[in-house]
Image (tube, rainbow, N blue to C red):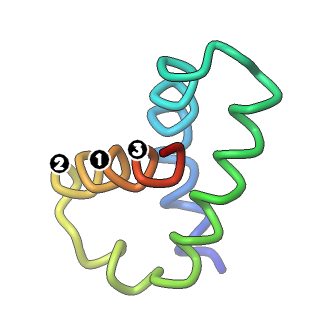
């Protein structure tokens, strides 16, 4: 769990701002963010193995596919 908390702390601002860029609605941002973090938790080891830049890019993809 500590590893997820660290990942969340390092990337949550990016995820929330990227979602807001698409939605402009704070309620929708929280809903989509919840779905994104569930996906991350389900594949946590995969995300933790990524280098930071690849992780940021991949999270943007997860946001886009979750929002779509």
Callouts 3 and 2 close, C-beta under 8 Å: no
Residue at screen point 46% across, 83% down: 43
Mark 1 or 3: in front is 3
Q: Which residue is mark 2?
A: 53
The nearer-to-camera label among 3 and 2 is 3
Q: Callout 1: few (<14), some (14-19), or many (20+) C-alpha neighbours within 10 Å?
A: some
Say which of 19 and 66 sits in front.
66
Spot the residue most to the top. 24
Distance in Å between CA atoms under marks 1 and 3: 13 Å
Q: SS class of the residue under badge 3?
A: helix
User: Do the CB atoms of the residues marked 2 and 1 lie less than 8 Å apart?
Assistant: yes
Which numbered marker is on residue 64?
Answer: 3
Residue position for label 1? 56
Q: Toward the viewer: 9 or 29?
A: 29
Q: Indicate the secondary structure of the residue bearing disc 2.
A: helix
Question: Which label's residue is closer to the chain start, 3 or 2?
Answer: 2
57 sits left or right of 62 in the view: left
Quarter of the figure with the N terminus: bottom right
The quarter of the displayed image where residue 37 is located: bottom right
State the CA–CA distance, disc 2 to disc 1: 5 Å
Q: Which of the two labelled residues, at mark 1 and mark 3, occupies the earlier sequence position?
A: 1
Q: Quadrant of residue 5?
A: bottom right
Q: Is residue 12 above or below residue 61?
A: above
Rendered position, 60 above or below 14: below
Q: Answer whether labels 1 and 3 touch (C-beta < 8 Å).
A: no
């Amino acid at each position: 769990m500590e590893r997820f908390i660290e990942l969340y702390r390092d990337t949550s601002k990016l995820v929330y701002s990227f979602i807001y860029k698409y939605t402009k609605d704070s309620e929708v941002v929280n809903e989509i963010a919840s779905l994104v973090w569930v996906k991350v938790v389900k594949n946590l080891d995969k995300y933790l193995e990524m280098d930071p830049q690849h992780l940021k890019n991949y999270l943007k993809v997860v946001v886009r596919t979750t929002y779509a």
